[in-house]
Image (cartoon, grey):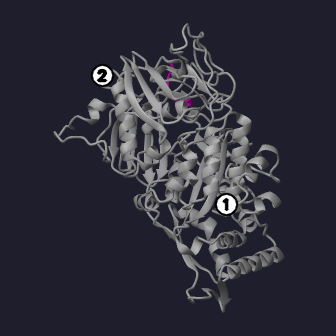
Amino acid sequence: MLNGGLKLAIVGLAGLLAIAAFSPPPVQAQEKVWRNALTLFGTPKYGPDFKHFDYVNVDAPKGGELRLSNEGTFDSFNPLIDKGAPADGMERIYETLLTPSMDEIITSYGLLAEAVSYPDDYSSVSFRLRPQAKWADGEPVTPEDVVFSFDSAKANSVRLANYYRHVKSAEKTGEREVTFTFDQKGNRELPEIVGELSILAKHWWQGKDANGNQRDISRSTLELPMGSGPYKVASMQPGSTIRYELRKDYWGAALPANIGAHNFGTVTYVYFNDPEAEFQAFKAGDIDFYQEKSSSRWATRYDFDAVKDGRIVREALPNRFRATGIMQALVPNMRRDMFKDARIREALNYAFDFEDMNKNLAYGGLKRVDSFFWGTELASSGLPQGKELEILNGLKDKVPADVFTKPYANPVNGEPLKVRDNLKTAIALFKAAGYELKGNRMLNAKTGQPFSFEIMLSSPSLVRSIQPFVNSLGKIGIAATLRTVDTSQYINRIRNFDYDMIWNVWGESMNPGNEQRGYWGSESANTPGSQNYAGITDPAVDQLIDMITSAKDREEQVAAVHAMDRVLLANHYVVPLFYSGEEKFAYWKKLTHAKDLPTYSSGFPSIWWSTEAVKK
């Protein structure tokens, strides 16, 4: 499904779906069979009459305050466009047709929709809306709202248009029924991904604001939005704070999927330009929850009184990463001539001394990423065998020879002799690509131009991890510079591929699908707003993506993913970085959660609650 990044809410997980039904077989072949859930593996855990998810506290009190923070800014409450910096927390006001379970892999249950139906050939999917689903102004959620949201998303977001490229149309097919038609058959992921679309109110967006101005779904807006979700935006200061309040009149409070969830009375986001100021605000008690991204700070900076006396709790959980593959990397922009040669990109990896950085800056708390699906069964390893080898043999003339003879491995540094040897290898790769080291500069042998580039970062907190890499490059005559830009500029520049190199992280589900085209597909390479940040245009990768999305069973899908992972790695499209494989966070003891958290998520903040709230 769709990924938006690694925020608290990682948005989207798509791929091959084995869709199971809980309703009786149809009386006639053409009759719709309505189901309450879609799942990837086997049978959904929860039947049509389930009362609540097992991992929630059904007695969790409602109320209390949750104060959160983020680095950067925001300037839009419109989730269906590529413009602007989207506000945090919009999932609290805009709902989807389906909602995922946190203790199953890629299994979703009805939210705005009470049931879903699809034909045997997966050429379409229909959703039947709940009769009680209402917007905050009391108007019912209608099929027209769903159609409007889908059409607006495809018209105004390159990212969403690419994601839903095989969804041909959406139309009202009943009083409470909407049907999505696909341009291909047999793609089992499509029913799931349309179920995760944010639904907006057509009548509100086509109406006028309090000043009589016509609203425009194609533009960013800071007007307080209206949704159907459990919260409303009570107040905000542009770019600075947002305050959400729990709605007492929320239509879906009693839904099984919502029991034990949405417990905080208010949720406030405060934005910081300085990550150190953000951390100090947490220490001072002005912020209630802090997700730690720095392994060194996690190891050395939590020795203050509130931690020692138990007022602040620290946890490191693997839950989310049990079903999320990670590729965190430095991404060279191959739209720049300097990075078109794979030998150049490989040489950059030889200059990255992960072992020294991990020891001296992260206190050994990180692991090197060596797969685009790192940490999951979808990560390739060893040499290709079986079905994967068969797939790669069919692409033999389009993939590097190394995929058949040499398992991928990152260079190992950390010791003076290894560092020296790896830098020699990097120099040799540059020489093979037409460069030569003269004096203290790496020069193009034909033009005499020095090899230099800029690494654009979204946060100053990333500088300390990358500065050693810059220093290492300097030893072989490469002048790399670091530049940190503000959130708005960063978003605009990456949407337009205006950079030499960036730091990015892709979160992959156990069920990869159409989103892969937006990450690595040739069509997205020159489409502004796509997430093909490296500019990959590789016929073999395109064919492998097709195999992934059209796989007939899990075995075939996994083999195709392994093959694609191996080809991406062998072409050195990125310089893999590192990850801890755990979600590290600290929080003031006024927050709490159930003893047993869901298998694949920390559940924060959806199923947590405040100890200061009183059970009514």
Image: 131 above or below 466: above
- Which amino acid is tagged 1? Leu
Image location (x, y in percent) of residue 159: 46, 48
**Residue topped by disc 2:** 139
What is the quadrant of residue 601 in the picture? top right
C-alpha separation, residue under disc 1 versus residue under disc 2: 49 Å
Quadrant housing the N terminus: top right
Q: Which residues are magenta?
A: 607-615
Which of marks 2 and 1 precedes in the sequence? 2
**Residue topped by disc 1:** 577
Q: Main secondary structure of the magenta part?
A: loop
Q: Residue at x 63, y 60 (%)?
A: 329
State whether residue 500 appears in this view.
yes
Image location (x, y in percent) of residue 29: 55, 13
As helix, strand or loop, the secondary structure at mark 1 comes to loop
Image location (x, y in percent) of residue 556: 72, 39
As helix, strand or loop, the secondary structure at mark 2 comes to loop
